[in-house]
Image (spheres, helix red, strand yellow):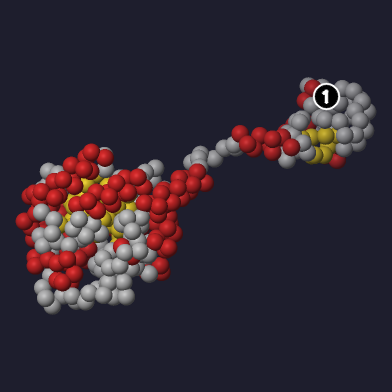
């Protein structure tokens, strides 16, 4: 487990095009312990055609047409993003953006910590190339992607930009518990030798386990959808963390680190009493006269460890005793002639 996993609260459009709500969610993310917040920048007409159908759980979000759904919350202007970015600076939380069209990239390039490339755009080479050329650090999600597609996107990015983190992701909303496939994190790391993280879309009841298990992988980053109200209908609220989930997750991570503890094997201060009382030392097993030669049957290892350790038993076999000894007495090196 890494000492610090960078946590991105993915607000997406859970702000519902309200500047006031966006700030509230960002503040909750900060209070919950997130390192960064991420928003999405798009205009519906530049993202989806009228033919684009739903790929989310329609029990949670009834809208079946992407264009209609995205049209609801594409109202933010550059001036709104400026206010959000300034607010993030004020409360000291990083700001990340997922741009979905070419026109917004230049506006954001000097205002962000990272550019995020959505799983859905892993084959959108014009967008990827323009983002890569900004030289800003990039996060690439890999949901619904083949190894070949990931390789090609990584190759394109690294032609222009070496600052890249890859996120394992399953592109289902929500992701079922047993579809998480965290083993793919190892595959990404082994194939690309780049920083790897997780973008999670599971329901919070599953996320707590999934994110904790992921933290034991070789990851540097976690992205999780985030809201101030999980009971809200539609959008990404239903599979999001809220402030209390994030606090709980961070407590679990801290607890796990404490359980893992020290990396170098040694006994603890709390084990000193056990070292004394649960270990053994050497005692005489019978009464012996002065000048007796010690053999194996004359000694016994008994608790506690208040005398000579049994690791030295061979050093006293064959030794001659200086004086009479009683059965049950502790054995000392000084009992013997040199």
Q: Residue at x 12, y 66 (%)?
A: 44
Q: Position of residue 184 (x, y in %)?
A: 34, 62
Q: 292 left or right of 56?
A: right
Q: 11 left or right of 271?
A: left
127 up-or-down from 4: above or below: below
The quarter of the displayed image where residue 76 is located: bottom left
The answer to whether residue 299 of the structure is visible from this angle is yes
Q: Position of residue 321 (x, y in %)?
A: 86, 26
Residue located beneath label 1 in the image? 335
The quarter of the displayed image where residue 311 is located: top right
The quarter of the image holding the C terminus is: top right
200 up-or-down from 84: above or below: below
**Looking at the image, which is closer to me, 7 or 18?**
18
Q: 201 left or right of 68?
A: right
Q: Position of residue 135 (x, y in %)?
A: 13, 46
Q: Residue at x 87, y 34 (%)?
A: 328
Q: Residue at x 60, y 37 (%)?
A: 267
Q: 86 left or right of 248?
A: left
Count the numbered circles shown. Answer: 1
Q: Residue furthest left?
A: 103
294 up-or-down from 73: above or below: above
Q: Tag 1, which secondary structure? A: helix
**Looking at the image, which is closer to me, 158 or 324?**
158
């Amino acid at each position: 487990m890494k000492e610090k996993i960078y946590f991105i609260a993915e607000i997406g459009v859970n702000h519902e095009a309200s500047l006031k709500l966006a700030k509230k969610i960002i503040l909750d993310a900060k209070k919950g312990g997130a390192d960064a917040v991420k928003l999405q920048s798009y205009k519906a007409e530049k993202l989806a055609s009228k033919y684009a159908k739903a790929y989310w759980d329609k029990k949670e979000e009834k809208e079946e047409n992407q264009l209609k759904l995205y049209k609801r919350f594409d109202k933010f202007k550059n001036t709104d993003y400026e206010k959000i970015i300034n607010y993030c600076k004020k409360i000291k939380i990083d700001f990340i953006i997922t741009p979905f069209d070419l026109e917004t990239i230049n506006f954001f390039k000097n205002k962000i910590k990272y550019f995020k490339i959505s799983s859905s755009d892993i084959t959108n080479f014009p967008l990827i190339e323009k983002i890569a050329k900004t030289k800003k650090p990039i996060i690439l999600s890999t949901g619904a992607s083949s190894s070949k597609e990931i390789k090609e996107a990584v190759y394109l990015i690294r032609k222009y930009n070496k600052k890249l983190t890859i996120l394992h992701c399953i592109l289902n909303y929500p992701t079922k518990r047993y579809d998480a496939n965290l083993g793919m994190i190892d595959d990404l790391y082994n194939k690309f030798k780049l920083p790897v993280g997780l973008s999670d879309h599971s329901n919070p009841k599953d996320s707590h386990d999934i994110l904790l298990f992921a933290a034991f992988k070789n990851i540097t980053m976690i992205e999780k959808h985030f809201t101030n109200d999980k009971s809200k209908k539609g959008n990404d609220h239903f599979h999001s963390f809220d402030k209390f989930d994030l606090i709980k997750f961070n407590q679990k991570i801290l607890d796990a680190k404490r359980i893992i503890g020290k990396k170098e094997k040694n006994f603890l201060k709390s084990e000193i009493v056990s070292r004394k009382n649960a270990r053994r030392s050497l005692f005489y097993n019978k009464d012996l006269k002065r000048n007796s030669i010690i053999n194996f049957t004359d000694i016994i290892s008994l608790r506690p460890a208040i005398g000579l350790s049994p690791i030295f038993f061979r050093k006293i076999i064959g030794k001659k005793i200086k004086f009479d000894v009683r059965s049950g007495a502790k054995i000392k090196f000084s009992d013997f002639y040199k």
